[in-house]
Image: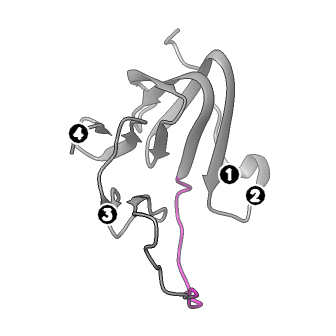
Amino acid sequence: MQNIEHILNKDKQVMAIIISHRFNEKGIHFFTPNEFSQQLAYMNHPAGKIIEPHYHNAVQRNVVFTQEVLVIKKGKLKVNFYDDELNYTESRILEAGDVILLSSGGHGFEVIEDLEMIEVKQGPYQGESDKTRFTSKHN
């Protein structure tokens, strides 16, 4: 799919999925495999489309690793990716309208331009026990 990028580690495991603000296809497109604890989709419907009323059933889920989605509203953000051994692998620049799902490995950020973004991740939040901070040799 155009304007969709998968960031992979050396074992071909998905560390991140980036949806460019340029992505524009009709219908519903899920970008995540069913086993991801965070599901990410894009929906593009014409005026008048009816989405039937519904609710979500109580389903017990076991979330082992937090996955997070960032929606860039304004500015530019550099995302640095790290593998499971905390080695820097690569970087990407996100801009207004871009969306990223961070699914595995490590990540760090550098704000390039004044930034507004929305973060979505599983809860409940466990404070500092939710993450391990590390020092990168990458600038």
Q: Earlier in the sequence, mark 4 or mark 3?
A: 4
- The residue tagged 1 is 130
What element does badge 4 sit on?
A: loop
Dominant SS in magenta: loop
Residues 129 and 91: in front is: 91
Residue located at (43% from left, 73% from top): 49
Q: Which residue extends farthest top?
A: 139
Q: Are marks 2 and 1 in contact (CB under 8 Å)?
A: yes
- The residue tagged 3 is 27
- Residue 63 location, x and y as percent? 54, 68
Please identify the quadrant where the N terminus is shown.
top left
Residue located at (66% from left, 37% from top): 117
Above or below residue 82? Residue 45 is below
Q: Earlier in the sequence, mark 3 or mark 2?
A: 3
Q: Earlier in the sequence, mark 2 or mark 4?
A: 4
What element does badge 1 sit on?
A: helix
Mark 1 packing: few (<14 Cα in 10 Å), some, or many (20+)?
A: few
Q: Indicate the amino acid at tag 4.
A: Gln
Tag in front: 3 or 2: 3
For the residues labelled 2 and 1, the Cα–Cα distance comes to 5 Å
Please say whether residue 134 is visible from this viewpoint: no
For the residues labelled 3 and 2, the Cα–Cα distance comes to 36 Å
- The residue tagged 2 is 126
In the rendered structure, which segment of residues is drawn in magenta? 55-67
Q: Earlier in the sequence, mark 1 or mark 3?
A: 3
Q: Earlier in the sequence, mark 1 or mark 4?
A: 4
- The residue tagged 4 is 2
Tag in front: 1 or 3: 3
Q: Indicate the amino acid at tag 1.
A: Asp
- Residue 68 location, x and y as percent? 56, 50
For the residues labelled 1 and 4, the Cα–Cα distance comes to 34 Å
For the residues labelled 4 and 3, the Cα–Cα distance comes to 15 Å
